[in-house]
Image: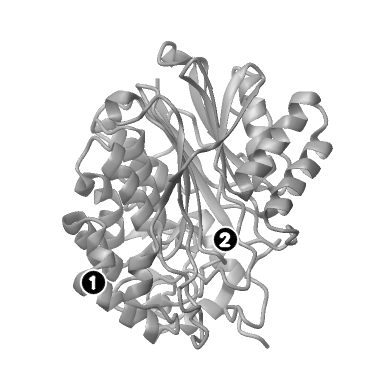
Amino acid sequence: MANLFDLRRTAPLALGLLLSGCGVTQGIFGGGHPKLGEPTPAKPVIGFAVAPVPQAALAARRILAEGGNAADAATAAGFALAVTLPSRAGLGGGGACLIDLPKSDGGTGIATSLLFPPGAPSGGNASASRPAAVPQMARGLIAMQARYGRLPLATDLAPAEAMAGGGVAVSRALAADLGVVGTALVADPAARAVFAGPSGQMLAAGDVMHQPDLAATLTQLQSSGVLGLYRGRLAEKFVAGADEAGGGLTMADLAALKPQYARPVTLERFGYHMDFIPDAGGLGAAAGIEALAADPAALAQAEQSALAAAQATRHGAAMDRLPASASFATLDSRGGVVGCATTMNNLFGTGRIAPGTGILLAASPTGITPPLLAAGLATRDGKFRAIATGSGQQGAAMAVAAGLANAVRSDEPMPQPVPAPGRANVIGCAGLLPGAPKTCAAAADPRGFGLATGSN
């Protein structure tokens, strides 16, 4: 039987089997009592966060409570996902974000996008037994935080570091992903130490997961910033660990690949200015919005348009066998907003952790069709109306198109679920922000295990 993580011989894990990491809306203004490892804000929260794992949404909420803006909160959520949902959002992977911050926070009044997908090594790591991607997650999130954040980086990373070092309850989203890969994941000793119990059984929802090596890496990032992982001793340790795990990465690979800011794809539809991540997922979402603007009831036609646009961008690559992804969004009281999509290019990436770092290695994009990283933003006269982020393999683009269209035509953030297999996370302000904060609300996809939290 083929090894589930041998990307040279088998299809990526869970392609078409598992949809997104997004989950049930546990309450727009919070939900339940914090579990072990979940940060609890002590101050009133002004703003919203929605993520596929409750602990990530709560981490963002804590940062908003401490005076952080949407970029700070998104940084906290992204790193928290690297701890709580490494199957789709680990430090070894990457993603893309749509960002719109006011001028007081370094914005320009015009949305921008930041692209940091897990990339291919310059040498192609042809001799590697488990070819790994060049990690971009930390580099992308820290680049965003450095440009737009209000709080110190160490503050934004504190929730993730605490959960990694002190232990965190396994979420239902992660437990579901662990159930898909099964015992193939624990064939790697470093992965077994994180994802399996003392007797070797896979961790279940509610079990406590400890990641001391990842905590040490996060501590280094808190003190040294992005250079803590991409240069110096930690970088050398990571490359050596990746080589030991069969990843085939080099110091030159870490230095060569960097996040890129880019202009979003833009449209004027439904009476709003709309921006989308300028990648296959965003282009597909824009095409879906175009179709829905012509006929809001034509969901099937819109989905065909979204897939066709994404496929054209990928030069005809099949859209039915895509890697898993995750998405999240944050909104602050000034109308600053960030929406991101993340991936490991395969569920749990290569299935191996670089020893001594706690970083799960993403799969090299060589030989696979990358996921659709999709997010869409609607504004009017520079004021925030709604943001939708999507996941769900081939349904990610349509999830954003339908989620955004539904939100701008309703007083609710998610009046109805988006078409399967897509999953959406949405934040919306029916009366625009700044201006009408009482009209703001957020929703996680009701078919998943996530959380929307915040206050207006």
Q: Residue at x 67, y 64 (%)?
A: 15
Q: Quadrant of residue 145?
A: top left
Amino acid at pointer 1: Leu
Q: Is residue 181 left or right of residue 44?
A: right
Residue 219 showing in the rendered view: yes
Q: Position of residue 361 (x, y in %)?
A: 44, 71
Quadrant, the C terminus: top left
Q: Residue at x 46, y 18 (%)?
A: 383
Q: Position of residue 36 (x, y in %)?
A: 33, 52
Q: Earlier in the sequence, mark 2 or mark 1?
A: 2
103 relative to 173, above or below: above
Amino acid at pointer 2: Ala
Q: Position of residue 104 (x, y in %)?
A: 28, 24
Residue 34 showing in the rendered view: no
**Of labels 2 and 1, the one closer to you:** 1
Total marks placed: 2
Q: Nearer the viewer, residue 217 or 316?
A: 316
Q: Nearer the viewer, residue 25 or 225?
A: 225
Q: Residue at x 42, y 50 (%)?
A: 260
* Residue designated by label 2: 176
Q: Position of residue 304 (x, y in %)?
A: 80, 44
Quadrant, the N terminus: bottom right
Name the mark on residue 234. Answer: 1
Q: Nearer the viewer, residue 224 or 198?
A: 224
Which class describes the residues within 10 Å of circle 2: few (<14), some (14-19), or many (20+)?
some
Which class describes the residues within 10 Å of circle 1: few (<14), some (14-19), or many (20+)?
some
Q: Residue at x 32, y 25 (%)?
A: 103
Kindly indicate whether the residue at mark 1 contacts the one at mark 2 (C-beta within 8 angstroms).
Answer: no
